[in-house]
């Protein structure tokens, strides 16, 4: 299962077959991965300093394994059952033709599909896997399940496999080469090569074909994530945006997310439209470039904000077994919906948001190359579009939405109004922020802007020019420690404000560069300077995830096969990674609260972090109800005077269903083994903050 690993585009760029190999060419063959610690230089985005850290020389391998989505896919019972059934049907069809069944499994992963083929009666079973740690694991899984003499494992990419390796051409092609975009892992090239060199002309492929659908929708949330909107200010001024932002086709990357969680906010504007069919069973049947156009009738009036894309697999040649990735509103409501994080729906954006009325006819234009897809309501070039306005290559979709978010912007506007007079000298420290433009529009005497990221600084510079604020805002193209009084025009800073936001931050408590920058700027601050935010609290809550825990949960037995060797590999790799906390957008993953939100750490930004002592906290988390504990949610809350900006829980209404900030990722600790807990029992958390490097160490006792 070449795709038996998660290749979500929120984490990766365009992938090829065996995506890990494309990042590490030296993984070809059977190279062993021996551990050896080494010193690595790393720029610390929190402090702005260079750190030397001790890291295993094979950290990239370990990280790939620990954070892979293999487990998630192996927990997908619908997928596994349909592969098993389709493989059985394919073997039966070949046997009925009095043929010896010779199966080839491209990108075998754990070896699961090859073992299915062997059980179903394939006479010769060959599997290939290029990622050497995974190939070694697959070999162990195959041996544990008694198929050592039945399945031949070749530790190569399928494109490097020769007929000498497999003996003769195969007649059953078993693959799982797919990602959210279906073709993003290089399925077209892999299938084309396999059919040309390794397969018989009349072979059977499992799956047999893929059908791709799109549906135009209106959704305010997704619209916020696509383009920056004008910010209206209370003094009848505004921060305006260039027109180019509204006519840009965006970056050539999908926006993949669990769209089922947006069901209440989505209005479908037409019925689903099948735009492509991918035939996996025939030679030369997969063009690298293709375009289609379909005339569509609107079933509702509205604004075309986006297209939702998904695909179905016809698993067998008869088309009887269908594996669907359709969103919930396009499914039979009586059937349970399989949860998947490896294959989600994808969102694409049109060049222009077009208004339509119910009954209107319009045209959908669909395109793909070897790896990517794009869609529009007007003809476009047959090459992958690229961002022309700078926004989409500078900011993530989440960050674009965050910059548009009304409640957040209202908080900042009110704060600036409260603290700014015509004599106020303001310093903004954040990456890619609208705060300096807001402060200038609210008539601060002078605004200085410190942005440590070149790309975001360049983009904000263009916004400053567009709003004719060059005389009000000074961009500080220096690091904080190099700023001199003359850089500030010999003015003293009266107000320091940060969102805070750091482009390089992954976890919600890592946006701390402004705090460290303040240490170097303290001689440039006025005696009565106001610093916002003034503090940060890190909070935690015990949760019972409905599904998210599956991406780290052990598999054990899968369709009757023992996959525990894989579980062990994941555990060893995960234990080798220093930080057990990973970022996740928790609004996409339903959960129930098993405890109240609990403060586990506190930082006072009015005190310098430099040369201060390490902070340590020991906190008990009390369960507020019975349940199954399989994760901990963590987030940061920043205090701005009487206001609190949460990057996690939006409000605590004492309900069991938390409501999360959609524009931030939260931290999460996922338990490898869930455990039943009782109300009023508790567990302990140990938290340490190292001010030297800005790192938090969070452990659960």
Image (cartoon, rainbow, N blue to C red):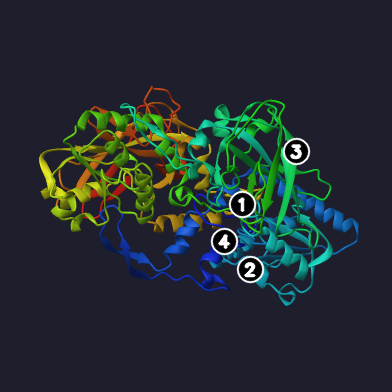
What is the x, y in percent for residue 266? 58, 30
* Label 1 Cα crowd, 10 Å radius (few <14 / some 14-19 / many 20+): many
Residue at 65%, 30% (x, y): give it.
Answer: 269
Mark number displayed over residue 19: 4
Which one is nearer the viewer's eye here, 61 or 293? 293
Q: CA distance from mark 2 to mark 1?
A: 17 Å
Horizontal side of 506 relative to 421 (left or right) equals right
Residue highlighted by disc 1: 179
Q: Earlier in the sequence, mark 3 or mark 4?
A: 4
* Label 4 Cα crowd, 10 Å radius (few <14 / some 14-19 / many 20+): many
**Which of the two marks, 3 or 1, is nearer to us in this view?**
3
* Secondary structure state at the residue bearing disc 2: loop
Vertical placement of residue 671 versus 623, above or below: below
Q: CA distance from mark 2 to mark 3?
A: 41 Å
Residue highlighted by disc 2: 157
Horizontal side of 577 relative to 568 (left or right) equals left
* Secondary structure state at the residue bearing disc 4: helix
Q: CA distance from mark 2 to mark 4?
A: 10 Å
Marks 2/4 in contact by CB < 8 Å: the verdict is no
Residue at 32%, 40% (x, y): give it.
Answer: 437
Q: Is residue 501 visible?
A: yes
Q: Earlier in the sequence, mark 3 or mark 1?
A: 1
* Label 2 Cα crowd, 10 Å radius (few <14 / some 14-19 / many 20+): many
């Amino acid at each position: 299962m070449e795709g038996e690993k998660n290749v979500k585009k929120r984490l990766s760029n365009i992938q090829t077959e065996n995506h890990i190999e494309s990042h590490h060419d030296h993984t070809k063959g059977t190279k062993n991965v021996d551990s050896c610690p080494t010193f690595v230089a790393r720029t610390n985005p929190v402090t702005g300093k260079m750190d030397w850290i001790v890291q295993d020389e094979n950290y990239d391998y370990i990280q790939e394994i620990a954070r892979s989505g293999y487990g998630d896919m192996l927990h997908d019972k619908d997928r596994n059952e349909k592969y098993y059934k389709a493989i059985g049907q394919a073997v039966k069809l070949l046997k009925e033709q009095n043929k010896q069944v010779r199966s080839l499994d491209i990108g075998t992963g754990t070896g699961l599909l090859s073992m299915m083929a062997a059980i179903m009666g394939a006479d010769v079973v060959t599997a290939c896997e290029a990622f050497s740690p995974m190939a070694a694991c697959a070999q162990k899984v195959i041996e544990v399940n008694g198929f050592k003499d039945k399945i031949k494992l070749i530790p190569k990419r399928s494109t490097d496999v020769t007929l000498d390796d497999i003996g003769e051409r195969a007649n059953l092609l078993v693959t799982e080469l797919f990602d959210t975009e279906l073709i993003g892992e290089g399925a077209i090239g892999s299938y084309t090569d396999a059919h040309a060199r390794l397969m018989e002309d009349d072979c059977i492929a499992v799956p047999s074909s893929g059908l791709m659908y799109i549906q135009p929708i209106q959704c305010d949330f997704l619209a916020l994530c696509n383009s920056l909107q004008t910010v209206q200010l209370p003094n009848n001024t505004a921060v305006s945006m260039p027109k180019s932002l509204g006519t840009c086709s965006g970056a050539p990357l999908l926006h993949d997310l669990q769209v089922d969680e947006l069901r209440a906010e989505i209005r479908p504007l037409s019925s689903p439209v099948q735009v492509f069919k991918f035939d996996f069973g025939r030679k030369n049947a997969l063009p690298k470039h293709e375009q289609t156009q379909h005339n569509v009738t609107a079933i509702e009036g509205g604004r075309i904000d986006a297209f939702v894309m998904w695909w179905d697999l016809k698993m067998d040649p008869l088309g009887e077994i269908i594996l669907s990735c359709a969103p919930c509103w396009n499914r039979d409501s009586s059937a349970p919906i399989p949860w998947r994080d490896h294959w989600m729906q994808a969102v694409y954006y049109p060049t222009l948001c077009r208004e339509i009325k119910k009954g209107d006819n319009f045209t959908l234009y669909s395109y793909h190359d070897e790896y990517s897809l794009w869609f529009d309501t007007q003809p476009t070039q047959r090459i992958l579009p690229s961002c022309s306005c700078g926004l989409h290559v500078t900011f993530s979709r989440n960050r674009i939405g965050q910059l548009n978010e009304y409640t957040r912007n209202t908080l900042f506007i009110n704060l600036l109004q409260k603290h700014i007079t015509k004599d106020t000298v303001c310093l903004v420290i954040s990456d890619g922020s609208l705060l300096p433009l807001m402060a200038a529009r609210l008539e601060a005497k002078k605004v200085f802007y410190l942005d440590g990221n070149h790309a975001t600084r360049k983009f904000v510079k263009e916004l400053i020019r567009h709003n004719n604020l060059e005389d009000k805002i000074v961009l500080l193209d220096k690091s904080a420690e190099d700023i001199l009084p003359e850089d500030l025009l010999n003015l003293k800073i009266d107000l320091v404000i940060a969102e805070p936001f750091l482009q390089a931050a992954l976890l919600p408590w890592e946006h701390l560069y402004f705090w460290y920058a303040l240490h170097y700027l303290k001689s440039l601050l006025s005696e009565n300077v106001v610093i916002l935010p003034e503090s940060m609290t890190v909070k935690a809550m015990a949760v019972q995830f409905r599904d998210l825990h599956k991406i780290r949960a052990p598999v054990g037995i899968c369709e009757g096969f023992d996959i525990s060797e894989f579980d062990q590999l994941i555990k060893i790799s995960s234990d080798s990674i220093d930080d057990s906390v990973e970022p996740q957008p928790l609004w996409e993953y339903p959960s129930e609260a098993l405890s109240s939100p609990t403060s586990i750490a506190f930082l006072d930004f009015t005190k310098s972090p430099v040369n201060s002592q390490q902070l340590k906290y020991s906190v008990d988390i009390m369960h507020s109800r019975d349940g199954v504990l399989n994760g901990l949610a963590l987030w940061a809350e920043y205090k701005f005077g009487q206001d609190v900006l949460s990057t996690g829980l939006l409000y605590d209404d004492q309900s069991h269903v938390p409501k999360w900030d959609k524009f931030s990722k939260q931290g999460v600790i996922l338990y490898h083994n869930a455990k039943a807990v009782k109300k009023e029992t508790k567990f302990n958390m140990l938290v340490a903050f190292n001010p030297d490097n800005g790192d938090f160490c969070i452990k659960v006792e």
